[in-house]
């Protein structure tokens, strides 16, 4: 892996005692884990793995947090390089960190997508900080969300074209199953610069596919459930495992003494929907195993150019019907007419709203996305025409996936139930296929 520090051995100065508090708690109520991160250990790891000399002056500061982790920013007075240490809760011990490192290395090696370089990692919590952790380059730029309203139409079009280029590169990478990437053999402790361990296949080196570490398999007590976790040979096997987790959740709710009548009623309905989806499953997915993945979490500079793609944790190799979908930032409702500023109330409290109510920007985005979605598809037709074919062929399967994902979501149960009953009627020949409708599209309305 190419290091982001070109003169690490020449850094001079010293870390000052930035931390006043004894530590920062990292906790997650959903999985019931809480631990304290010692800032002095963060400094120790940074010094050791970035080759920072004792006399170097610098700073360790809290930067941000995710669902299962906290990020610490590391700077020095010797150069303009920035680094991040991510301390992670053991939501899926070893597997989650190992997979994220493997994914970052693979994307760096096989595409032009700007992802952070990894300097060191530890995929075990049996260490000094008591956490799994990764030490990575901090990429320049800010989130696309912060810049979007200030970007011209030309800049937005350029960004969409760049994302299409990255999507096409990912589309060219295929795997023989469904799962998350692993460093194989086991990575071991504190592997400096995270040298990639891969399995050899004809013409190209690939990491090995391992078990799924997506949130679907980790939420609540799902890590303790006895279900297959991959790698899966087919879409049917993958979805069957997810439905098994849904059924286990509902059984737990129904049998729990603490559940009230509403909880039990919702669980019974979700359980019935899951069983109906299991019956429909072979009709939608006889067998399939071609995979790729999707691009999200984009960083841009002041000119709106992509500087990095972040947050590759729990990214999986998925079936083409699932992977060939629009990037998340291009999804949304349609708005046929451009909104008029004068029809919206003023807002002088939030500088990012530029004097007009937030609803105006929401409606403007919906209008802009119509054109940008069309541009993205045009780019994909040029760069990877098979991607468009897979997206169009996979629309019904994508709807089934939405039903599986939301069959236990009480806010969407009614729509899922209506869609499932429609599919049953179509399969039994009671209703024409022409009367089918998209479940996914209804969720945007």
Image (tube, rainbow, N blue to C red):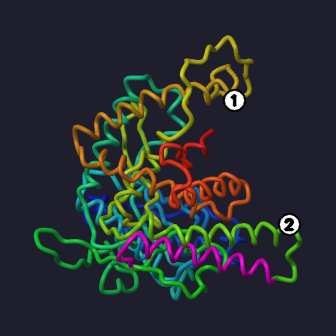
Residue 365 in view here: no
Q: Most prominent secondary structure in the magenta stretch?
A: helix
In the image, residue 329 lies at what x, y percent?
Answer: 49, 42
Q: Quadrant of residue 215?
A: bottom right
In the image, residue 424 lies at what x, y percent?
Answer: 57, 60
Q: Mark 1 points at which residue?
A: 350
Q: Is residue 416 above or below residue 285?
A: above
Q: Name the residue under label 2.
A: 262
Q: Which of 242 and 312 is in front in this view?
A: 242
Q: Earlier in the sequence, mark 2 or mark 1?
A: 2
Q: Is residue 247 above or below residue 321?
A: below
Q: Left or right: where does residue 94 sit relative to residue 52?
A: right
Magenta span: 231-255
Q: What element carries label 2?
A: helix
Q: How many marks?
A: 2
Q: Which residue is drawn at 43% across and 46% down?
A: 327
Q: Residue at x 23, y 60 (%)?
A: 110
Q: Left or right: where does residue 31 sit relative to residue 325?
A: right
């Amino acid at each position: 892996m190419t290091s982001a520090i070109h003169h690490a051995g020449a850094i001079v100065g010293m870390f000052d005692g930035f931390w006043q508090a004894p530590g920062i708690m990292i906790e997650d109520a959903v999985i019931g884990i809480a631990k304290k991160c010692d800032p002095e250990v963060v400094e120790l790891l940074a010094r050791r793995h970035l080759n920072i000399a004792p006399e170097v002056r610098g700073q360790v500061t809290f930067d941000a947090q995710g669902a299962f982790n906290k990020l610490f920013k590391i700077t020095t007075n010797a150069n303009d390089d920035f680094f991040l240490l991510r301390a992670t809760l053991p939501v899926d011990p070893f597997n989650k960190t190992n997979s994220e490192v493997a994914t970052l290395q693979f994307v760096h090696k096989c595409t032009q997508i700007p992802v952070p370089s990894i300097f060191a990692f530890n995929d075990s919590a049996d260490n000094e900080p008591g956490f799994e952790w990764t030490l990575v380059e901090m990429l320049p730029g800010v989130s696309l969300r912060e810049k979007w309203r200030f970007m011209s139409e030309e800049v937005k079009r350029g960004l969409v074209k760049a994302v299409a280029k990255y999507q096409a590169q990912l589309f060219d990478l295929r795997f023989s199953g469904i799962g998350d990437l692993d460093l194989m053999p086991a990575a071991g402790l504190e592997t400096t610069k995270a040298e990639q361990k891969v399995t050899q296949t004809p013409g190209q080196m690939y990491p090995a596919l391992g078990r799924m570490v997506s949130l679907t398999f980790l939420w609540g007590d799902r890590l303790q459930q006895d279900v297959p976790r991959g790698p899966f040979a087919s879409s049917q096997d993958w979805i069957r495992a997810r439905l098994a987790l849904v059924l286990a959740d509902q059984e737990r709710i129904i049998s729990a003494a603490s559940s009230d009548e509403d909880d039990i009623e919702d669980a019974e309905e979700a359980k019935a929907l899951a069983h109906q989806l299991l019956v429909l499953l072979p009709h939608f997915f006889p067998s399939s195993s071609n995979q790729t993945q999707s691009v999200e979490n984009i960083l841009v500079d002041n000119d709106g150019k992509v500087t990095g793609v972040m947050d590759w944790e729990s990214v999986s190799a998925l079936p083409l019907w699932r992977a060939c979908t629009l990037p998340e930032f291009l999804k949304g409702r349609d708005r046929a007419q451009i909104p008029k500023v004068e029809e919206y109330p003023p807002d002088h409290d939030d500088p990012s709203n530029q004097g007009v109510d937030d609803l105006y920007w929401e409606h403007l985005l919906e209008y802009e996305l119509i054109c940008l979605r069309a541009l993205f598809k045009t780019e994909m037709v040029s760069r990877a025409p098979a991607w468009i074919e897979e997206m169009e062929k996979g629309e019904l399967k994508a709807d089934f996936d939405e039903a599986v994902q939301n069959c236990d979501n009480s806010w969407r149960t009614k729509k899922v139930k209506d869609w499932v009953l429609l599919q049953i009627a179509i399969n039994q020949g009671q209703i024409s296929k022409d009367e089918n409708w998209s479940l996914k599209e209804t969720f945007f309305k």
